[in-house]
Image (cartoon, rainbow, N blue to C red):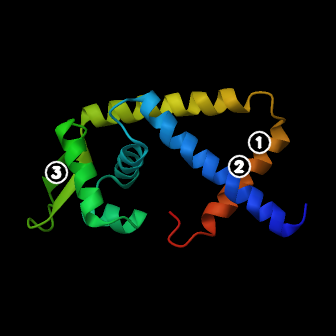
Amino acid sequence: MDAAEAVETIQREMTVFARRARASAGRLHPELSLVSYTLLGHLEESGGCRATDLAAHYALDKSTVSRQVAALERADLVERRLDPQDHRVHVLHLTEAGRRILAQVTESRRAAFRERLTGWPRKDLERFAQYLVRYNASLPDAG
């Protein structure tokens, strides 16, 4: 396989991976899309942030994030709190229900990965993990 064929294979397989990730998100928790799961994860990691920060971080349109956040608020997974330093700004935080759902879905995802990777030699797992880290680190605004 030459370099062009390898890149084509990578592109094709990453597309399959993305499609499967979107499809499996709905099976893990019917009300939680892959985008919602990702936003909840970022809110947990960051300790809360503004909706505009989410939009900038994921290079999403503000209206898209606004719709996602509104749905998460309706589901009582996210709440808005006034920023203690600037009362004109609202910061999004996970609710207890949001933390619980995120933990459940995260554990389900980990279990699915463990199952799928069962039987892989440790060296292959390490190499695959290193390649994914390297690939994602090369993306603009990786984070």
Residue drawn at x 23%, y 43% as measured from the top left: 71
Residue drawn at x 69%, y 62% as measured from the top left: 134
Q: Residues within 10 Å of mark 2 (few under 14, many from 20)?
A: few
Q: Are marks 2 and 1 in contact (CB under 8 Å)?
A: yes
Q: Is residue 107 visible?
A: yes
Residue 124: quadrant of the picture: top right
Q: Residue furthest bottom?
A: 140
Task: Indicate which disc, 2 or 3, sits on the residue closer to the N terminus.
Answer: 3
Give 11 or 123, whichever is nearer the viewer: 11
Q: Residue furthest left?
A: 87
Q: Position of residue 26 (x, y in %)?
A: 42, 33
Q: Is residue 49 visible?
A: no
Look at mark 1 in the image and give the residue it sits on.
125
SS type, badge 1: helix
Task: Check the image and report above or below for 113 versus 62.
Answer: above
Q: Any mark on residue 80, and which?
A: 3
Q: Position of residue 107 (x, y in %)?
A: 50, 30
| Residue at mark 2 to residue at mark 1: CA–CA distance | 6 Å
Q: Residues within 10 Å of mark 3 (few under 14, many from 20)?
A: some
Look at mark 2 in the image and give the residue it sits on.
129
